[in-house]
Structures are given as structure tokens and as C-alpha cells.
Image (tube, rainbow, N blue to C red):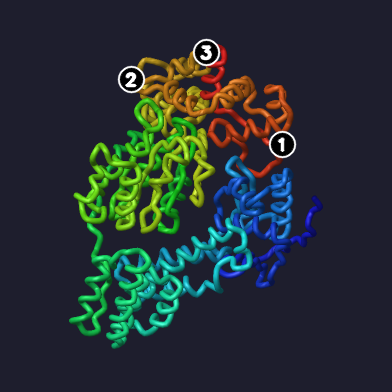
């Protein structure tokens, strides 16, 4: 395939726009973005800014039916051409487009992308409303809406993947418009929202919140008969299309209008506090400051409804999720609940069992149509489908955060993700769950030396850490930066107060005995790694056992992997990338070719794999 011609962007202020046709401008001058497939790739990367986009997702966007054998190389060409068009580096000097184990990532600052500015203004507007500053809320929300130049990505919607991303953007716009309209109504300025609400209701006739705002705006403007007619039209539409009645809140709004003057009312009552079912956090927590900040920004902003935190067994995913959930109490008044998707033995739980526990923990059994007796969701004979209906009904009426912990695969959680409403879901998983989309992804790296030493010091005391800092560093490095291993080392040393750090470091440095040392009471690193090992397919286990022989050198290249596996380049690439998806192999964060990349098997996993192969 020939490379598309490119024009290198000159340095200057870069602005990307998705809220309308895809555009890029440098210092106000529009930059041509190349052929259609190249624009599809750029649009998909911009739709998920600062987040790795899997190669499979990009392939499906560009070639939805029959991708060519050269699809991966073609994508590299399109990405390289896009990089040349928009410039090699962002305002902070870092490369704009990088490639890592999660896919391609496009770095972009808030001021450079209209969707990020839109999200920031929307969040600021909602925060102002929560503080009671309605004029400020209305102003900020209007500024967010003014960024829209038409249907998002309207020039690329013939691609199903781009159309899906555009639909998500439109849904966000609708929510912000509703927020803005309600703020204007409460300020007594309903007339400014009437026409916009009418147009949106015509395009989204079953969206109840829009209908309610339109009714309120008409009523406040003195057009009571029209407001009541809006409700009557909606009631007939619901009966005809869905066989349902309007919600009790909508009906109450209608009845209130029959007997009131121009007073506006919100259709829904304030949400009652929901359940909080979270395990106790770890006794010590360190590291992952950037990841925690990312989680709080994404979930706290209300723009993303699903986040996947991935990493190998013992990487600290659950601890991070629980910490974030506790810090987000104000954002999720409808509840914060953790549901474990695996049993105590590490195997996947039955879907109906998980749904039943979620329904029970959240007290959701009474939300089914007809009340608690209409669907005994807590009964042993309840089917998975009936439970899913009850669960979705509860989610649709709440602003809650659900943590689905230790998810084995995509199929285990699809029925648990919210289809509508304001709930968010935080998923933790060992693998990257590439089949879940669209989601925000956070891959947990190994702890840096400083973070691991901080965690160890919290467990054994800073004074003891200072007695032999070199030995302490050897301990955390022998743990491979795995939080669980560092934590177990700290718990063990806290009990064995007589044991010099250097002697324990020597034990961990010994490949034959390291895993035997990482046991504290009923907490065993070997047992946790064994659970992750069972997740792998038989073929992946055999491959990992062979690649583990390369661990002592600190990493391996594709050529060395092919030699160890006694296979060709294509087979080696597929084998290594399968283990990357499963979280058993790490790859560089920056974009490099498959041949230049240095891959790694985490030290303790490598020791376990070699032990299994030898056994």
C-alpha cells in the first residue's frame, strides 16, 4: 500500500473539533486531514482522548466487514501520516501519538479538543448548580452548548464505529441541554429554552426529562394549555409505542400544573441516599496517584459510565477501586456497591448468582414493575433474564457507582452494565477486556521504586527502612513492583522483627525460594498468581512458560520470542499479544514497532511459570 501524501504541521496552537465535522486547526488555519480512512483513525483516537484504543477497535472502524491481511500495517501508515499532519509533539513536548500494550493513544490537552472543553464546562456548570449558583451554572452550561457546530462527526457517520462514538457525544449534549434548560427555568427565564426544547423533543420524543423541561418552560411562560398537551401527547405515544404509562414523577408534574400558576417544578424528587457496600480498604496504600486522579476525574465528571482498571493478580486493582469509590461519595448519592464476579476459589461465578447478589446488596428487588411481589428477584428460582430486568430498572433510577471486582471476561459483565440512567460502573480485571467498548481504560503499571518503598515503609516503619535502604530497594525490586508482594513482604517483616532486611532480600533474590517467602498468614502471593495462571488458555500457558526462561535478562524482543517458541514472526506476534491482552506480558508505553519493542514477563509470574514448566 502506498503512503498517503502528507503535509507536516508547523508549530503553533492546535485545536481539534469533533462537535461537528472532524477538523484540526493550527493558529486558526484548518489543516487537511487526508483520505477518509486516515480521518476515521484520527476521529476514533480523538473520541477517546488520552486513552489507549485497541488495534482491533481501529480495525473494525476502518474495515467493519472484511479487513485486509495488511490491516495492521495500513493502520501504522495512517497513524504515521496523521502524526505528520498534526505535528509530532503536543504543547508539553511529548509525542502526540504513542503505541503501547493497550493500543494507540493520542495525547491532547483540554484546551486543544472541543469535547474535553465541553466536558470541563459541563462539570463546572453542574458543580455550580450543586452549590446553589444557578446563574453561574446556566452560564457555564450555555458555554458548553455553544461549542457545538452541528451533529458530531457528521462527515464520517457511515462508519458504524464512528457513528457509535457520535451517538455517545450526542447523548452527552442532550444531558447538558437538559441541565441548562432546568437551570434557566428555575431562574424564571424559561422563554429562552422553549424553542430548543421543542426541537429536541421532536427528535427524541421518548426522552422524558426533555418532555418535562418543555412542559415546565411552556407552563412558566403562561402557555398552560400547550404544556398540558405535551403531556397528553407523551402519554399516548408511550401507550402506543411501548404499552406503558408515563412515570409517576411525570404524572405528578402534570397534575401539579392543573392546579398551579406559573411555578416551575422539577419532575423528580431528590434522590434518597443509597446503599454503601464496600470492603475495608487496605491497611497501607501507596502509589498510583496519577491513576487515582484519572479515576476521580473520569467518574466524578459524570461523562463516562464505564471504566476498566486492568492489571495482573496482586496489582492493586481492587484497592484502587475501593479508594476511588470512597472518595466519590458526594458524586454518587444513589449508592456505592462492590460485587465480586469470582468465587473464593478464583473461578467465575454464575451470571444469575452475580445478578442476584447485586440486586440483594442494592435492595433493588422492589423496583420491578408492579412492586416487590411482581418479580421475586431474591428467590432461588429467579432467572438471569428476570434478574437483569430488575437490576436495569434499579440502575435507571439511581445515580450510583457499581464496582464489579475481578471480572474474568467480557461475557460476565455485559448484563450488569447500565443501559440507561446516570449510574457508572468501575470494572477491575486481570486482562484488558478488549471486547468491552466504549469504556475508559486504566492499566496499572508496576509500582516505581519510590512508591514501593513508601508502601514497604508504611508496613515496617520508616525508621527500619532507613537502617538499610539498599536492602529495602533490593526487596521491592525482587517483588517486581507488585503491590501484593511488597505488602506481604512488609507484613512478614513486621512480624519477624529480628530479621535483617539484607537477609530477607537474599531470600527473595533466590529464584528457587522467592515465592515461598511471600506468604503472610493466609495471604499467599503464589496462590494469587496461580489463580491468574488458571485464567490463561492452555496454549498461552505453554507460551508463557517458554518466555519466562527469558526473564533473567530483564526483557525479550520479538526475535528472541520467536526463537524460544520455535515459530515464525507472525505466530510470535500473535502469541505475545495474546499474553499482553491477558495481562501476563507487558510492553512499552511508547509507540515502537513490534521488532523494536522490549517485552517483559513480571518477575514473580515468570518464576511461577518456570516452576510449573519444570514440574
Which mark sits nearer the N-terminus, 2 or 3?
Answer: 3
Cα distance, mark 2 to mark 3? 21 Å
Q: Residue at x 31, y 65 (%)?
A: 130
Cα distance, mark 1 to mark 2? 43 Å
Q: For mark 2, does the 10 Å Cα neighbourhood hold few (<14), some (14 to 19), or many (20 or more) residues? A: few
Residue at far bottom of view? 222
**Where does the image place residue 4, in percent across and percent down from the top left?**
78, 57
**Where does the image place residue 424, in percent across and percent down from the top left?**
38, 52
Contact, CB < 8 Å: mark 3 with mark 1?
A: no
Which mark sits nearer the N-terminus, 3 or 1?
Answer: 3
Contact, CB < 8 Å: mark 1 with mark 2?
A: no
Q: For mark 3, does the 10 Å Cα neighbourhood hold few (<14), some (14 to 19), or many (20 or more) residues? A: few
**Where does the image place residue 225, in percent across and percent down from the top left?**
28, 86
Closer-to-camera residue (465/580) = 580
Closer-to-camera residue (411/42) = 411
Which residue lies under the disc numbered 1? Answer: 596
Residue 125: image quadrant is: bottom left
Residue at far right of view? 2
Q: Residue at x 58, y 70 (%)?
A: 20
Which mark sits nearer the N-terminus, 1 or 2?
Answer: 2
Residue 178: image quadrant is: bottom left
Q: Vertical placement of 308 versus 254: above or below?
A: above
Which residue lies under the disc numbered 3? Answer: 512
**Where does the image place residue 420, in percent across and percent down from the top left?**
39, 57
Closer-to-camera residue (478/349) = 349
The local secondary structure at tag 2 comes to loop
Cα distance, mark 3 to mark 1? 31 Å
Residue 554 got which mark? none
Residue 521 got which mark? 2
Closer-to-camera residue (558/212) = 212
The local secondary structure at tag 1 comes to loop
Amino acid at each position: 500500500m502506498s503512503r498517503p501524501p502528507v503535509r507536516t504541521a508547523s508549530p503553533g496552537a492546535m485545536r481539534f473539533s469533533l462537535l461537528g465535522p472532524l477538523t484540526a486547526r493550527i493558529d486558526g488555519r484548518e489543516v487537511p486531514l487526508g483520505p477518509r480512512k486516515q480521518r476515521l483513525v484520527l476521529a476514533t483516537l480523538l473520541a477517546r482522548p488520552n486513552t489507549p484504543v485497541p488495534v482491533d477497535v481501529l480495525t473494525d472502524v476502518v474495515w467493519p466487514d472484511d479487513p485486509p491481511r495488511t490491516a495492521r500495517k495500513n493502520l501504522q501508515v495512517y497513524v504515521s501520516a496523521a502524526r505528520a499532519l498534526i505535528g509530532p509533539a503536543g504543547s508539553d513536548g511529548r509525542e502526540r501519538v504513542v503505541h503501547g500494550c493497550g493500543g494507540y493513544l493520542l495525547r491532547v490537552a483540554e484546551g486543544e479538543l472541543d469535547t474535553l472543553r465541553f466536558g470541563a464546562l459541563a462539570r463546572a456548570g453542574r458543580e455550580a448548580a450543586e452549590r446553589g449558583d444557578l446563574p453561574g451554572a446556566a452560564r457555564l452550561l450555555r458555554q458548553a452548548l455553544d461549542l457545538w457546530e452541528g451533529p458530531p462527526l457528521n462527515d464520517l457517520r457511515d462508519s458504524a464505529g464512528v457513528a457509535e462514538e457520535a451517538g455517545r457525544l450526542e447523548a452527552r449534549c442532550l444531558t447538558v441541554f437538559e441541565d441548562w434548560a432546568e437551570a434557566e427555568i428555575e431562574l424564571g427565564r424559561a422563554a429562552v429554552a422553549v424553542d430548543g426544547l421543542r426541537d429536541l423533543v421532536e427528535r427524541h420524543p421518548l426522552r422524558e426529562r426533555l418532555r418535562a423541561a418543555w412542559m415546565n418552560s411552556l407552563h412558566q411562560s403562561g402557555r398552560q394549555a400547550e404544556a398540558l398537551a405535551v403531556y397528553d401527547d407523551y402519554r399516548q405515544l408511550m401507550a402506543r409505542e411501548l404499552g406503558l404509562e408515563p412515570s409517576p414523577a411525570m404524572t405528578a408534574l402534570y397534575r401539579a400544573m392543573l392546579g398551579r400558576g406559573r411555578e416551575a417544578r422539577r419532575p423528580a424528587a431528590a434522590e434518597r441516599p443509597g446503599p454503601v457496600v464496600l470492603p475495608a480498604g487496605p491497611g497501607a496504600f501507596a502509589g498510583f496517584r496519577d491513576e487515582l486522579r484519572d479515576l476521580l476525574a473520569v467518574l466524578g465528571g459524570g461523562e463516562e459510565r464505564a471504566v476498566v482498571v486492568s492489571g495482573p493478580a496482586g496489582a492493586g486493582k481492587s484497592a484502587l477501586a475501593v479508594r476511588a469509590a470512597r472518595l466519590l461519595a458526594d458524586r454518587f448519592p444513589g449508592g456505592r456497591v462492590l460485587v465480586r464476579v469470582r468465587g473464593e476459589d478464583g473461578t467465575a461465578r454464575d451470571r444469575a448468582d452475580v445478578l442476584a447478589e447485586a440486586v440483594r446488596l442494592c435492595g433493588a428487588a422492589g423496583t420491578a414493575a408492579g412492586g416487590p411481589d411482581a418479580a421475586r428477584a431474591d428467590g432461588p428460582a429467579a432467572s438471569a433474564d428476570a434478574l437483569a430486568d430488575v437490576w436495569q430498572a434499579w440502575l435507571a433510577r439511581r445515580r450510583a457507582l457499581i464496582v464489579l471486582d475481578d471480572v474474568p471476561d467480557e461475557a460476565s459483565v455485559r448484563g450488569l452494565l447500565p443501559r440507561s440512567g446516570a449510574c457508572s460502573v468501575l470494572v477491575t480485571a486481570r486482562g484488558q477486556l478488549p471486547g468491552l467498548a466504549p469504556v475508559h481504560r486504566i492499566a496499572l503499571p508496576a509500582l516505581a521504586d519510590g512508591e514501593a518503598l513508601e508502601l514497604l515503609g508504611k508496613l515496617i516503619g520508616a525508621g527500619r527502612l532507613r537502617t538499610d535502604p539498599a536492602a529495602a530497594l533490593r526487596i521491592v525490586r525482587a517483588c517486581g513492583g507488585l503491590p501484593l508482594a511488597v505488602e506481604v513482604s512488609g507484613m512478614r517483616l513486621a512480624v519477624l522483627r529480628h530479621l535483617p532486611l539484607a537477609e530477607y532480600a537474599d531470600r527473595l533474590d533466590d529464584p528457587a525460594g522467592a515465592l515461598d517467602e511471600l506468604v503472610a498468614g493466609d495471604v499467599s502471593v503464589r496462590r494469587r498468581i496461580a489463580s491468574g495462571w488458571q485464567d490463561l488458555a492452555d496454549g498461552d500457558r505453554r507460551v508463557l512458560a517458554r518466555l519466562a526462561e527469558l526473564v533473567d535478562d530483564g526483557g525479550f524482543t520479538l526475535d528472541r520470542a520467536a526463537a524460544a517458541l520455535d515459530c515464525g514472526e507472525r505466530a510470535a506476534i500473535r502469541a505475545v499479544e495474546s499474553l499482553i491482552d491477558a495481562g501476563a506480558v507487558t510492553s512499552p508505553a511508547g509507540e515502537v514497532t513490534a521488532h523494536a519493542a522490549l517485552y517483559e514477563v513480571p518477575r514473580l509470574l515468570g518464576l511461577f511459570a518456570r516452576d510449573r514448566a519444570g514440574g
